[in-house]
Image: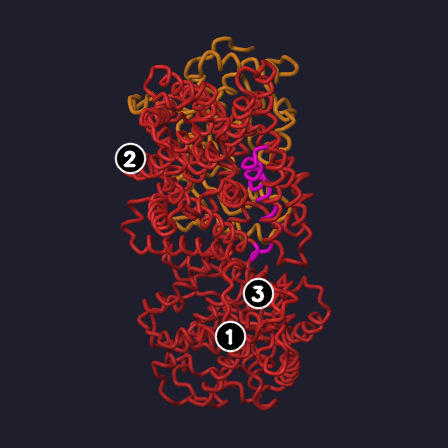
Chain colours: A red, B orange
Amino acid sequence: MLCAALPLLWLPLAGAAATEEPTPEPGSPGEPPPGLALFRWQWHEVEAPYLVALWILVASLAKIVFHLSRKVTSLVPESCLLILLGLVLGGIVLAVAKKAEYQLEPGTFFLFLLPPIVLDSGYFMPSRLFFDNLGAILTYAVVGTLWNAFTTGAALWGLQQAGLVAPRVQASLLDFLLFGSLISAVDPVAVLAVFEEVHVNDTLFIIVFGESLLNDAVTVVLYKVCNSFVEMGSANVQATDYLKGVASLFVVSLGGAAVGLVFAFLLALTTRFTKRVRIIEPLLVFLLAYAAYLTAEMASLSAILAVTMCGLGCKKYVEANISHKSRTAVKYTMKTLASCAETVIFMLLGISAVDSSKWAWDSGLVLGTLFFILFFRALGVVLQTWVLNQFRLVPLDKIDQVVMSYGGLRGAVAFALVILLDKTKVPAKDYFVATTIVVVFFTVIVQGLTIKPLVKWLKVKRSEHHKPTLNQELHEHTFDHILAAVEDVVGHHGYHYWRDRWEQFDKKYLSQLLMRRSAYRIRDQIWDVYYRLNIRDAISFVDQGGHILSSTGLTLPSMPSRNSMAETSVTNLLRESGSGACLDLQVIDTVRSGRDREDAVMHHLLCGGLYKPRRRYKASCSRHFISEDAQERQDKEVFQQNMKRRLESFKSTKHNICFTKSKPRPRKTSRKKDGLANTEATNGKPPRNLSVQDTAAVILTVESEEEEESDSSETEKEDDEGIIFVARATSEVLQEVKVSGSLEVCPSPRIIPPSPTCAEKELPWKSGQGDLAVYVSSETTKIVPVDMQTGWNQSISSLESLASPPCTQAPTVTRLPPCPLAAEEPQHPFNLPYDPRPSFAFPPSLAKAGRSRSESSADIPQQQELQPLMGYEDRTHLSPGTANSHWCIQFNKGSRL
Amino acid sequence: MIRSEPPALLTGSFSQASLLRLYHRFRALDRNKKGYLSRMDLQQIGALAVNPLGERIIDSFFPDGNLRLDFPGFVRVLAHFRPIDDEDPGIRDPKEPEPLNSRMNKLRFAFQLYDLDRDGKISRHEMLQVLRLMVGVQVTEEQLESIADRTVQEADEDGDGAVSFLEFTKSLEKMDIEQKMSIRILK
């Protein structure tokens, strides 16, 4: 129904169209429409953007097709495939349209296609590596490019003098030098496209790649100088012009870099103040970087250098300032744009090559150029490396040199520059165009194809990606400091000295100025690594959740749905755990099914692996503002949760020691009771306050678990009745009394953070507390909804009432389920006896962190919330309420025995 | 006081030119021309004072509680940072002590900056101290502690809650120590 949809384009109100006059077309104002056209074709209005979009689409589709086969892409670099595709498409276009269209226009290339690629490479350039090798990079970029340009130009001229180039190529020495200058520069796009797939070692990569980026300044200068000399005519060039040429090299390069740094500074400064308008952060990055490019281009400075420096300079501060989401957005957008531009460039290169009207072939020139660029590149690399190795700590060996020589790919920059030549001034332009195309094709296709096997064959040291570890990060910093100190002692102001200087300057002034204060505070590299490691672990844990479960022999068909449910809302999870509690009550005497066990495991997985669910306050429908408190909270939580898990897993897996963590049981039981009591009181919506109580749990209970436990377990051995559990009060009251006695025996309050018992591990409705309790922060208490707070208060009051008389019966019921499950899995790691060695105890810092965080929060309402609890805590020491929990401990032990 | 010809073993096979250069530096640092360096002399190097590990590095110049640092000692410490020559690997007499600039010795130098009590292990406490020096004031004490915990646990393989030298080297086995702990001019 195309015709049904199309009228919408020009009929604003389709429904009212019958009665109203159709609004006039924007394209033809004034002219009354002849009638209600059902269909109208307006190709010309959309032609330009449509074509652009279409080309990008074609390129992207081609990419998809290429990557369908791993075999092809692993053998052939994508750039080759794209160029070949371009050739085919160009042929088709030529055959259909009878004229070459859609070529790589230098204007488009320099203004739109190149900047994203350069920005991407500058922004994601490993800055440390770059500066470590800056000397080599600059040498190759400046000396190497000059060398290549002059030798190639001169040699070609010599070739012409020797009569090997056909006489119809009318070119003087200057023309050849001009050609040499544009053909000599290693192209960043081509190098990146090929080297990204080759994975040579970092040093080699950064040298080749850095060279290709920085040599732009030299290329631009050489090209411009030669071009103006050619236009002036060699006779008119004076000595001062040569001097000016040399001077302009400095102006263009340093000016470009300066422009880039200024914009980097502006960018960093701007992002410092975007706290309330997070949504435009990525945009700012792109805008200012692009502005740097255009500014440099406008002042005929090196635009590539400007963007590179801008990206390189701003990254640290921008990344610190912008939000996590913006960081992702920047990264993806940048990569998307760059990859898109790269794809289009290579495809258009292929298409442009088809247009035979632009080029004229001369075998001598083409072959000569090919030979010379390869030869002089190799020669230049060898000579420069020899010099550089005198100064390098790690010399570049022969293999490196081979790869560097061979990796000198030419690309679209050369092509765009040669297209820009003025035919009237450079009569041999057509020959140069043909030669450039051949050179570009040769380097990209032949060298691009062969460099991978070559690297393999030469056994070039590959880059190895290993996960960053905290140790490495820390020690690396130590080494840096040591080296800086040693240079100080030796009195040599070398690289380490200056790096140290810079870092101190950066820390003292720049970071203070350019980083948001909050960002600055947490922006430390070691901390950063730590943080990222934790996040990664959390993610991988959640990802592997299924495997972990299946490894325990449980299949969980319900997992996905539950996952999503728990993720989505507070109420769901609360309902879930709530219903769990109810279920518990109902099925007390029935046999535990596999389903229940599965539920239990699932619950633990969710509690452990997922974020704490929380209520959503506001719908995030604002276009200008993305609420991200949740994100930050979650990050924090991931971090805390993860830390906990990490410590656990370290101990349990690495040392093969399973430690029983000290329990939050006391409050658990009492808590549970509260919940239940509350349930009764409030008629059914109570389970919610469970979570609230959990938060309380952190704050309160930190006592003498260890002794209690051992103690109680001893008492328990004598009269362990736990397995047969009856949900009646009598036996419990008995036990309660007993345990409260034991409590008095061991009064020493040792602060050990809570951790779940086996029962908690097994049984969802118990564990939530244990798991969550540790890291509940002030934020979570803050977001407790009102109804929960009331529930909370009620529970407190019920608890108070519960504490004073010996006991209310209701709560005890809930304790029951643990037995069968615990008995079923005796070798569950957490069932192992508690190991009193402190090293295996859960580190106190964690619990402390959780505690102090909630304590330190100055929130008044929260304080109010806490107060009753504190009072409660005191009471619980003595009350049977706490003691009640002990039979749980005993019970577990008992069941094990 | 100053030995004009330090024994070859002690020089860590520095080149003549480097030795001369170090000797001049040594003289320059020695303010009162007393023939040895005191801690004060090193502490007065401005940049060293702001180096977070400066104090510890100075300590390593004065092993065993010495108060005086003579030229051979000075050279010996600096010899750790000589780049490793790739000309003579393997042909060394195994009985000969490992050269000071070997990977192991470089690592040992770094290790003893952490290991304050010289018990051959970096305890959690020692790790925390280093972290406190390095990380700066922005990170809270609790966070530091958890970083220290994690760092120790990451490297700790035998579960004794501390990082031994072996574990230390293992945690860095992927790193190019030869490069990261060498200074070119000390050839």
> Counting other residues with Cα less than 10 Å from the Cα at mark 1, is it few (<14), some (14-19), or many (20 or more)?
few
> Which callout, 2 or 1, points at the residue further toward the start of the chain?
1
> Counting other residues with Cα less than 10 Å from the Cα at mark 2, is it few (<14), some (14-19), or many (20 or more)?
some
Q: Which residue is at a point 38% across and 77% down the rendered structure image?
A: A558
Q: Which residue is at a point 32% across and 34% down the rendered structure image?
A: A460
> Which callout, 2 or 3, points at the residue further toward the start of the chain?
2
> Counting other residues with Cα less than 10 Å from the Cα at mark 3, is it few (<14), some (14-19), or many (20 or more)?
some
> Which callout, 3 or 1, points at the residue further toward the start of the chain?
1
In the rendered structure, the answer to whether residue A260 lies left or right of residue B16 reads: right
Q: Position of residue A790 (x, y in %)?
A: 66, 82
Marks 2 and 3: same chain?
yes
User: Does residue B98 belong to the magenta stretch?
Assistant: no
The answer to which image quadrant residue A679 occupies is: bottom right
The amino acid type found where label 3 is placed reads Ser
The answer to which image quadrant residue A616 occupies is: bottom right
What residue is disc 2 on? A454
Q: Tell me: residue A556, above or below residue A441.
A: below
> Can residue A441 be seen here?
yes
The amino acid type found where label 2 is placed reads Leu
Cβ atoms at labels 2 and 1 below 8 Å apart: no
Name the secondary structure under disc 2.
Answer: helix
Q: Which residue is at a point 63% across and 61% down the rendered structure image?
A: A852
Q: Tell me: residue B94, above or below residue A726.
A: above
Residue range corresponding to the magenta coloring: A301-326
Chain under callout 3 = A
What residue is disc 1 on? A38
What residue is disc 3 on? A748
Between A96 and B78, the one lying in front of the other is A96
Q: What is the magenta segment's predominant secondary structure?
A: helix
- Single out the mark in the foreground, 2 or 3: 2
